[in-house]
């Protein structure tokens, strides 16, 4: 399971690990947020080191559908439930700044970009009402959207909202250009080194599996911050969604499309080196570790695609993890209680391309002491109003329910060996045990997430252990795939 973007790419070279030297700025995470931030700091003459637990683009950026759009489904309507029109305009301004920066960067570094109209569309009467609200909110925020009755898609739609002159690209090409520029300024990149903690001292101490690194400031660009300080995990809903690429599609749409109804359907095309175009179909998002079968979601998306695009030949399928903030606004800035020495960015709610670049611009301005963009303060942590508090309570009540039911659902024995590709959680004297068989190897690990003690569930699509509390994910052998957990599931005999 590899994304269209990552397929065939080679893991980049690593710089020598010399933690004893120390740096001015340590950036944790080599996705779009981390690398744009690192480049901006390096351009200003800062000593920058980027530390990545896996490889650049391994998580969100390399598995996105990579739409650079200011029309984002019905996101502005969701945001306006909790925030003022002024805040919504600031959100759009942040995304506009991120979009413009990326487009200029791509033009300057030879990264091919396709300009396309973006569409939000409805297939139900309720969806049409959602579109009407989104049209009003986009106009309120200054976007030149328009109502469309006929979207010319190969399935029935009732209406759409259109925003012209948006963009799409290959995100892995952007990461490659950013890595090259970072090194041209003397920045360093280390991958396959997992950060396990950060002490906000003078200087900060970045704890890794390969030793400690000292840094004046630290940026957490890790999807969700790996520090519990700040309680970011309690303000986010981790979600997984899926994408499939197809060749041989004669009726592929030319724009970028996203449904406002459920289940979500996302459409775009992607030009390939041989001159052909592939169709990307995405959707079927759900809470991490909270459904019976992830593979069923992939199969549903596959069946829908073949029904509406006959002759489509699948080339790749993959999934991604995103974090939806309870109040629909990303959080960017200093981590509370760190004395302005540790910074974080999270909560892009599946719109990570423009939000990541906007967040990086905001972070770099803060770290360099530059004037904050006019829209920047809207991205700082906010005092929650009654609606946000209610939403936060509901989200965390669900977390509590999954914490309880996970412990109640363990089986009677850990001795049974699952069939190939399967995993089960069983009871033992030492607590819940996760047993799985993948590629002929049977592994037994603790089924208790080391973050906050949730019982993990088996992901039958990606062959991983997923925590339904805050979205940590682990390989069959227990090694960490995604945080906020920083330590593995313990082996069990």
Image (tube, helix red, strand yellow):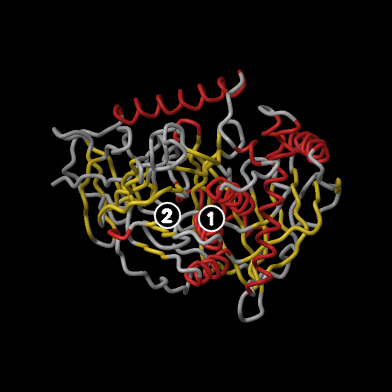
User: What is the quadrant of residue 290 in the picture?
Assistant: top left
Above or below residue 380? Residue 173 is below
Residue 121 disc label = none
What residue is shown with label 2?
24
- The residue at the point 50 percent across, 42 percent down is 239
- The residue at the point 67 percent across, 59 percent down is 101
User: What is the quadrant of residue 246 in the picture?
Assistant: bottom right
- The residue at the point 42 percent across, 54 percent down is 24
Above or below residue 87? Residue 264 is below
Q: Secondary structure at mark 1?
A: helix
**Mark pair 2, 1: CA separation:** 13 Å
Q: Nearer the viewer, mark 2 or mark 1?
A: 2
Image coordinates for residue 200, horizontal then vertical, percent: 37, 40
Q: Is residue 222 visible?
A: yes
Q: Is residue 476 visible?
A: no
Residue 37 disc label = 1
Marks 2 and 1, the one that precedes in the sequence: 2
Image coordinates for residue 13, horizontal then vertical, percent: 39, 73
Q: Residues within 10 Å of mark 2 (few under 14, many from 20)?
A: some
- The residue at the point 75 percent across, 46 percent down is 121
Above or below residue 204? Residue 187 is below
Image coordinates for residue 16, horizontal then vertical, percent: 32, 69
Image coordinates for residue 116, horizontal then vertical, percent: 76, 62
Q: Nearer the viewer, residue 176 or 216?
A: 216
Q: Secondary structure at mark 2?
A: strand
Give the position of the N terminus as an image quadrant. bottom left
Above or below residue 239? Residue 385 is above
Q: Residues within 10 Å of mark 1 (few under 14, many from 20)?
A: many
Q: Nearer the viewer, residue 334 or 408?
A: 334
Q: In screen coordinates, is 97 left or right of 417?
A: right
Q: In screen coordinates, is 166 left or right of 63?
A: right
């Amino acid at each position: 399971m590899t994304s269209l973007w990552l397929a065939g790419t080679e893991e980049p070279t690593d710089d020598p690990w010399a933690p004893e030297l120390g740096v001015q700025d340590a950036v944790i995470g080599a996705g779009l947020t981390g690398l744009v931030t690192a480049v901006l700091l390096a351009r200003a003459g800062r000593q920058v080191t980027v530390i990545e637990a896996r490889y650049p683009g391994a998580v969100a950026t390399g598995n996105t559908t990579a739409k650079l759009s200011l029309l984002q489904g019905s996101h502005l309507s969701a945001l306006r439930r909790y925030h003022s029109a002024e805040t919504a305009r600031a959100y759009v301004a942040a995304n506009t700044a991120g979009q413009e920066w990326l487009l200029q960067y791509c033009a300057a570094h030879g990264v091919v970009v396709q300009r396309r109209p973006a569409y939000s569309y409805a297939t139900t009467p309720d969806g049409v009402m959602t579109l009407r609200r989104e049209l009003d909110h986009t106009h309120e925020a200054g976007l030149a959207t328009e109502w469309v009755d006929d979207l010319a898609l190969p399935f029935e739609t009732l209406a759409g909202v259109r925003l012209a002159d948006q963009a799409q690209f290959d995100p892995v090409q952007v990461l490659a250009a950013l890595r090259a520029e970072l090194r041209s300024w003397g920045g360093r990149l280390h991958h396959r080194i997992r950060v396990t903690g950060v002490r906000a001292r003078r200087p900060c101490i970045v704890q890794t599996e390969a030793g400690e690194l000292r840094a004046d400031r630290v940026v957490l660009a890790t999807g969700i911050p790996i520090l519990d300080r700040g309680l970011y995990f309690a303000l986010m809903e981790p979600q997984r969604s899926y994408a499939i690429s197809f060749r041989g599609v004669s009726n592929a749409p030319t724009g970028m499309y996203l449904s406002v109804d459920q289940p979500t359907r996302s459409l775009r095309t992607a030009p390939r080196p041989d001159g052909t175009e592939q169709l990307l179909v995405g959707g079927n998002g759900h809470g991490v570790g909270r459904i019976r079968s992830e593979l069923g979601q992939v199969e549903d998306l596959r069946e829908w695609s073949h029904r509406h695009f006959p002759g489509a030949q699948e080339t790749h399928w993959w999934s991604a993890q995103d974090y939806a903030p309870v109040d629909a606004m990303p959080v960017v800035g200093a981590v509370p209680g760190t004395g302005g020495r540790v910074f974080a960015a999270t909560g892009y709610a599946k719109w990570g391309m423009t939000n990541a670049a906007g967040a990086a611009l905001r972070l770099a301005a803060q770290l360099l002491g530059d004037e904050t963009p006019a829209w920047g303060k809207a991205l700082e942590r906010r005092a929650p109003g009654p609606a946000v508090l209610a939403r936060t309570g509901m989200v965390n009540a669900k977390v509590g329910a999954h914490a309880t039911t996970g412990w109640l659902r363990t089986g009677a024995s850990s001795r049974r060996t699952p069939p190939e590709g399967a995993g089960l959680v069983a009871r033992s004297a030492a607590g819940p045990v996760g047993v799985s068989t993948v590629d002929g190897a049977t592994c037994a690990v603790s089924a208790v997430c080391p973050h906050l003690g949730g019982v993990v569930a088996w992901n039958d699509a990606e062959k991983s252990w997923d925590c339904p509390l805050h979205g940590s994910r682990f390989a069959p052998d227990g090694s960490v795939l995604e945080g906020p957990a920083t330590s593995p599931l313990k082996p069990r005999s």
